[in-house]
Amino acid sequence: MKRFLYLLHRRCGLIVALPVVFWTLSGILHPTMSWLRPVPATMTPLPIILTESDLSYDLGETLQRHGVGLIQSASLVTDGERTLIRVVPADGSEPRHFDLRDGSERPNGEAAWAERLARHYAGEPNAAVVSNTVLTHFVPEYREINQYMPVRRVEFDRADRLRVYLDPQSGALGSLVDRTRGWLTQGFAWFHNWTFLDEVVPSWIRPVALVGLSILALISGVSGLLTYSLVRTKIGKAAQAGGLPIRTRLRLAHRTLGVLISLAFVMFAASGLHHALHKEIRTPQPDTSANGPALDPSTFAVGLKEAYRLASETGPIVNLAIVSLPDGPAYRFAHPVARSPKPLEPASGSDQSAPSPLPVATYIHAQTGTKLSSQSDLVLAQRLATEWTGYPADLIVSSELVATFSMDYPMIFRRLPVVKVTFDTPNRETLFIDPAWGVLARHLVSEDIPPALTFHFLHKWHFLDFMGKDARDGVMVAFCGGIALATGLGAATWCTGLRRRGHRNPAA
């Protein structure tokens, strides 16, 4: 048994030695990216307040005059002096910006808005803009974890080549990337996810290789730990002896360091394998390309100004959307959100609680002028959820407004507030939907929970959160370095054995 475990450990270890070094390097790069990342000047979006004086001209008439028919969405932006209306045409063309104080269109409004946002978040008032482009897919330096898509990418003419990724619809910051962070992010993608393989081999090979090598790494770690348990007495005697040959000293160092890092190695390998397997077989996300019918504001019986007057009775207006509810189009006027210490529960019957001083939004029906229910965010999210999944509405078992991050909706998903819609399906399918923009923030099914927990605690080591993020990252870096060193010592031990066997059996 001892020899079998030893050979299993050695052979698997030799196969995964280089991949393990790659993974440990990426494990060191990950917190390094956090430590060296450019810091935003602010995380607070540009302040926008809509007033009645911003609505001198009718939205529908203004759009007609400028040749805009059907639109997919609308929102508020600012040029620093005035509040403008940003509309996304239904034909997929670039968003256009209109000033309803005088009915004019702002040429290149989207680029100007992106530059204003970029300067705001970067704290960069002077540097020239090198490029200002639209990004419609994730790239190595702007990965899926940043959530927002599509985004604008604004690059400044600075020594650090600062790039600002931002969501022009919500005005939110996606990411700041300078030259150093760009290199580190690219290195992480290469060493951790092996994205370089996608350039040279079919796309299916990379996940298969990652899963297969993760299995071998796990086998190597477990068999190595079992081997140590069988030879620890022999190792103790060898450690007390002097004048050991180099190969014995390397083997002793490898085994001693290996047992110290073995638990961390098994944790990383097992959770990485679990995550990689689940990523390939998980329930696909619903198709969210359908976002309701396109709308024509020129056909609305109630103009934007009249709707504004009704909504402003509730409180200040900080954003606008035009949405399609089951009973027709509506204006959605967003109010400042006061964060609640716990998720906001939907009102039930006449016993309604109000954790925040204002509702998240006020809905005004665009045809009747009726101020709609305070539960309209839930109604909108339910419509989107059934449209995206194809499930009937009677399968919905709960829907609630969530205003804080939680275990099932952690901070990495960025968007708040969202509506959590849960279906009565075998896998308890749940959608977290941003009602302001009709965006799917997270898709969760029951089989996602175990790999999420293993990744959270065994791969990211959040059980050390009590130490603080930097201390936790420092501990992980130390263990990654130890794993890399133990792997190198094991490979060196094998190489010295090869050389010795070569000397004993010289070629004829």
Image: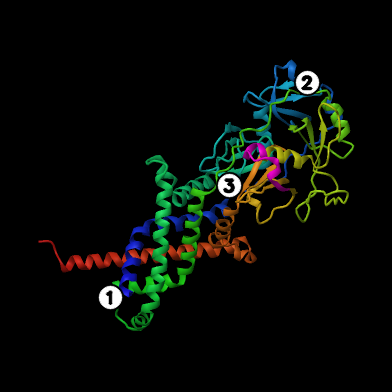
Q: Nearer the viewer, residue 119 or 229?
A: 229
Q: From the viewer's perspective, tell me whether residue 235 is left or right of residue 284.
A: left
Above/below status of 207 relative to 380: below
Q: Which numbered disc, 2 or 3, marks the residue that appears first in the sequence? A: 3
- Give percent across and percent down for residue 177: 57, 44
Determine contact: label 2, label 1, CB under 8 Å: no
Which region shows up in magenta?
386-398
How far is disc 3 from disc 1 in space, using C-alphas?
A: 49 Å
Q: Quadrant of residue 175?
A: top right
Give how far across and how far down residue 251 sits, in percent. Answer: 33, 72
Residue 299 is marked as 2
Please identify the quadrant where the C terminus is shown: bottom left
Counting from the top left corner in percent of width and height, residue 34 is at 57, 53
Residue at 55% from the left image edge and 57% from the top image edge: 451
Q: Which residue is mark 3?
A: 145
Establish if 413 lies above or below 332: below
Is residue 42 among what the camera can see?
no
Q: Which residue is mark 1?
A: 245
Callout 3 secondary element: helix
In this rendering, position of residue 446 left or right of residue 79: left
Dot 1 amino acid type? Pro
Residue found at the far left of this picture? 508
Seen from the viewer's position, the closer of residues 153 and 268 is: 268
Q: Callout 2: few (<14), some (14-19), or many (20+) C-alpha neighbours within 10 Å?
A: few
Identify the secondary structure beneath mark 1: loop
Left or right side of 42 for 227:
left
Which residue appears at 82% of the width and 48% of the height? 347
Q: Is residue 225 visible?
A: yes
Amino acid carrying mark 2 in the image: Thr
Q: Nearer the viewer, residue 284 or 397?
A: 397
